[in-house]
Image (spheres, rainbow, N blue to C red):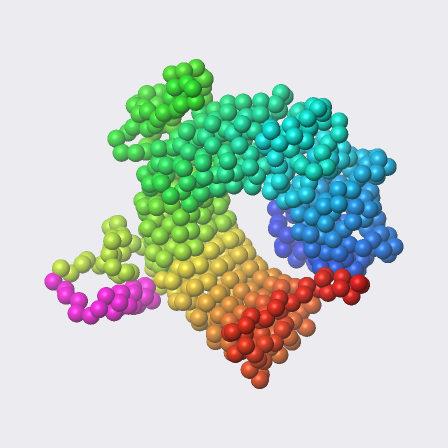
Amino acid sequence: MSLQQLPHEVLVNLFSYLGVSDLQVASCVCRLWREVAGILLANRVTVMITDDATPAIETFRSATIPYCNWVFKEVDIHLTCEFRQEWRRVAGGVQYLGLAEEADVTPRELVTLLQSCVSLQRLSLDSLPHLLMPGTLLSDPEDRALLSKSLANVKHLHLACSRYLTDALFTRLTSVVGSLTRLSLAGCQISFQRSLHKRFYPHDREHKHPSEHVLTFTHILKYIEANAHTLKELSFGRTYIDSESLHRLAIVPRLKLESLHLMSCEQLSKSGVQLLCENQPSLTHLDLSLCSRVTDYAVMAIAYHLPHIKSLNLRRCRGITEYGLRALAQLSCLEELNISHLENVTSESVLVALGGGVGNEVTEGITYEGNGRYSLCGVNNKAALADTTNNDSEKNCNDGTEVSANSGKEVARPHLRVLNLASLPLGWQTVAQLPSLAPSLTHLDLSMCVAGVNDKSIQAVCKSLRLLRTLNLNGCMGVSDIGLAGHGLGQREPNITGTGLSLEALGIRERDPLKVSLGSKAEQIIRQEAEVKRYLEANVEEIVKSSEYGLANLAGLRELNLCGCKRMTDITLTHSFSLRELQYLNLSYCQGVGESGLEAVARYCPSLEVVMLEECGNTTDHVVLVFAHYLRRIKTLDLQKCVQLTDDSLDSLSGCRTLRYLDVSGCRRLTLGAVRRVQARIPLLLNLHYRGIQEAGGEEQNGEGVAVSPVASSRIPSPPPLFPKLRRKRGRR
């Protein structure tokens, strides 16, 4: 049976494993594949209309796929007869509609826009001051009755960053949508003080007349109480919610939250987190990132009361120390964990948090002492092993009851998929143990872990974590071709205290105690790194044979960030960079990369869509020509400060019809004429940045198309140019 004879449902199931770019390519094969790919692309692709709504009419007409997701961003929406007619044709299948970042739309136009969206499930009205400021949105009962019928299927409502949202507007918006399962009020100006609520509602306790001047948490809480049986996800990030208000939310009857986002809530303290965990044990996703007052006791409360939590974000919580981080060992069901940018933790505590053993076969347990106090205590390893052989450990909330901890020296986390350890003081031994602790990782962020990422640890990651899809090594200057290419290091552990990158520090050659260096320290480092490069070039065959220890073993990798890895050279890119599924690659500030390495990237990574080469000094016109020839899917190309580029490179890019973003700022040898030619030849190039590009006569450009004198630009900055939207408004006036 040929592929053309397979049932339609089977083809849809097969194509569901492909990404958006692969589906777009598959849709060009034949009519049948185009129909199958269109079914999947309709739900995955979001059509964004910016700057002007007039070209959207052509988009509506030319769209052969019934796209379900539409976003109007920074656009003037004027519902002319032609626009209204085309919108009605596509609005029936729209499932997500977003108006964001000052989209200019009137209340009447919004009603007209929404009344045709009978299949809408998600509505986003983020940062729309011109729409909410007058306070007349949905003030007409007929409009509310009309939208109540068309928006009955809306389950997700996003009102983030709505500065002028009031109780009255909130009541009108929530009255026209269905029973919500997700509500986002992140960044809204919410008043949590009860005294302020009493001022605006001195006698109206039932809120029969919502205020037109303020958005109060008490009013929002009444809506949550009325819809507690359906609400599962809430977002109050970037607000002034305090512990008392969070407690009031947690004790709402019949409310069983599954996800709560509290990012950057500065007033939130440990008591609020504890009361939340005690009253909402059904939570599986919790975001406490950037909450500076969250301390160790809050982490212990999470580990004690939420043993089945799946996603936890503690990024940049400055109050958490190694004492609280050890409590995370209790959470064996974690699938996503973010503990990046914690300043007061150690490498050993991170290892314990991930389920690793600590020295004397003692693991940590949590004891609840009552009155909101928790403590960690040592548990004998044998007793812990006996507890884990039984069923899941039972949790008793009475005073003095101990929860058993993860047992053994190294306890694997089979469910952990996403792990962010950026900017942590990790040792390389801790990073090397990650594959044994979390063998199913698909996303790993080790950016700025300077001491933790070296050749030995990165080889351990590449050898065992074969399911990785995203790997971030930004700023990891200790890794070199030895680790990335997979060259064997022998049995000795690398000496990370050694000076620079040398064969002695890598354990390849014995250190000569009688050898005396007569040059300076800088000369010694340059000489040692040159010896390592010559050694690798002489042992290329061994690199190819040991590919399982390098990046070549991560065949399914899709995003790779090597920004700032200055010790990497063409050897890695040439011999171990055959990543057919790689879509994102960042090689910024990699000064050791040359033409041959970048040409190998273009040849052996055909799926690349985003390439970042900022200050990659060896990027030449030939490299850009090879990119334009081989990378048929490239959408974003960053060439900032690549000083060797000339106008020939831009002429090579003129054939890249898929290019959407190009940055050539700081490329001094380019001219403005070449920039204008590439902009004219690629109509879909929406973002083109060219700061510092000069005209043939010496006039410098500021990147917005305004020519200024080089002398004048250094003294008096030019006024900012008017946006096209403001320019049109001035013309209408």
Q: Is residue 46 visible?
A: no
Q: Nearer the viewer, residue 220 or 679?
A: 220
**Apparent side of residue 617 relative to residue 452 in the rendered image (left or right):** right
> Who's the residue at 45% across and 48% down the image?
445
**Apparent side of residue 708 relative to residue 456 in the rendered image (left or right):** right
Percent coordinates x, y for residue 316 in the rendering: 44, 43
Farthest-out residue, left: 514
Farthest-out residue, top: 398
Percent coordinates x, y for residue 472 in the rendering: 45, 52
**Apparent side of residue 616 relative to residue 24 in the rendered image (left or right):** left
Quadrant in which residue 249 is drawn: top right
> Who's the residue at 46% across and 63% down the image?
588
Q: Give the vertical position of 323 relative to 97 (above or below).
A: above
Q: Is residue 188 visible?
A: yes
Q: Give the vertical position of 227 relative to 290 (above or below).
A: above
| Stretch in magenta | 514-539
Farthest-out residue, right: 81
Quadrant in which residue 530 is drawn: bottom left
Question: Which quadrant is the C terminus positioned in?
Answer: bottom right
Q: Nearer the viewer, residue 60 or 270?
A: 270
Q: Nearer the viewer, residue 258 or 310?
A: 258
> Who's the residue at 71% across and 24% down the image?
203
Q: How many marks?
A: 0
Q: Give the vertical position of 183 relative to 472 (above or below).
A: above
Per the picture, the main secondary structure of the magenta-coloured stretch is: helix
Percent coordinates x, y for residue 577 in the rendering: 45, 59
Q: Nearer the viewer, residue 555 or 292?
A: 292
> Who's the residue at 82% across and 42% down the image?
115
**Apparent side of residue 511 relative to residue 284 in the rendered image (left or right):** left
Percent coordinates x, y for residue 597 in the rendering: 44, 67
Q: Residue 531 colored magenta?
A: yes
Q: Residue 629 colored magenta?
A: no
